[in-house]
Image (spheres, coloured by chain):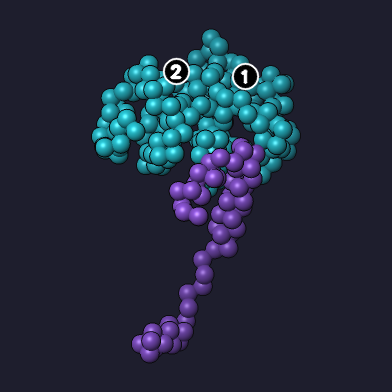
Chain colours: A cyan, B purple
Amino acid sequence: MKETLQVINQMQADGVIGKYAIGGAVGATLFLEPAATLDVDIFVILPADLGSLLISLTPIYDYLKARGATAKDEHVVIAGWPVQFLPPGNELEREAVEQSVKTDVEGVPTRVMSAEHLVAIALNTGRSKDHIRILQFIEQEAVDRKKLESLLESHGLTRKWKQFELKYLEGAHGQ
Amino acid sequence: MGNKEMRKRLAALSFSEKVKILEKLRDRSLALAGAGLRPKPSEDVLKKAKEKRKEV
């Protein structure tokens, strides 16, 4: 992972990508216990995002292929890790990248989405594995409930959250 | 150590340490996937296993 992040940081320094943040299961690992995953989700702001309606990942693939990375389905394998580059699909994901948390892997600087953003994105995505991850955040008290509720409200997810609470957290509200 | 306590301890590790665990978990998953399925036991082996269970 260290080498993978070094390549991504260099790609950022070379201007191919803008700000980025690790999301998904690897991102959640900053706050929770490690859980098996086979790939890394990198949410990335592309320089072309500004003022352009068309978003292309081609410059990323070209840059990485020239440096020995291989494309495999929707992933690019960098130093052994399949990486999926995801341009933010909505304002919540864009904000998650902008407000990401600084950290490092063995001295290599990187950024990870905040716990509250990871939970909000998981809620919005809504697959079973996302619900499981939200429950882990709640059980392990790895999320600030007040911050989360405010974030959910600002992105129109309060109703979805209430439904989630009713289904999975009944009796745990306010704990 | 209880399950809850173990999870708490793992969650308290540094990101670098957790990433090392992620890599080990990934390698194990890939090794298992690469090993393929175990060959189906022969009828003779199944019969013997059944007889053994009856004895127990």
Disc 2 is placed on an element classified as: helix
Left or right: residue A57 versus residue A149 is right
Pointer 2 or 1: first along the chain = 1
Q: Quadrant where the N terminus of chain A lies? A: top right
State whether residue A149 appears in this view: yes
Tell me, for residue A137, which label it has, or none. Answer: none
To which chain does the residue with label 1 belong? A
Q: Is residue B50 above or below residue A20?
A: below
Residue, x 69% and y 41% (percent of image)?
A79
Q: Quadrant of residue A40?
A: top right
State whether residue A75 appears in this view: no
Q: Where residue B26 sits: x, y (%)? A: 58, 50
Q: Quadrant of residue A59?
A: top right
Q: Quadrant where the C terminus of chain A lies? A: top left
Disc 1 is placed on an element classified as: loop
Residue under numbered circle 2: A91
Q: Where residue A2 sits: x, y (%)? A: 69, 37
Residues tagged by mark 2 and mark 1 found on one chain of the structure: yes
Q: Quadrant of residue B48?
A: bottom left
Question: Which residue sits furthest front?
Answer: B1
Residue under numbered circle 1: A18
Tell which of B30 and A131 is nearer to you. Answer: A131
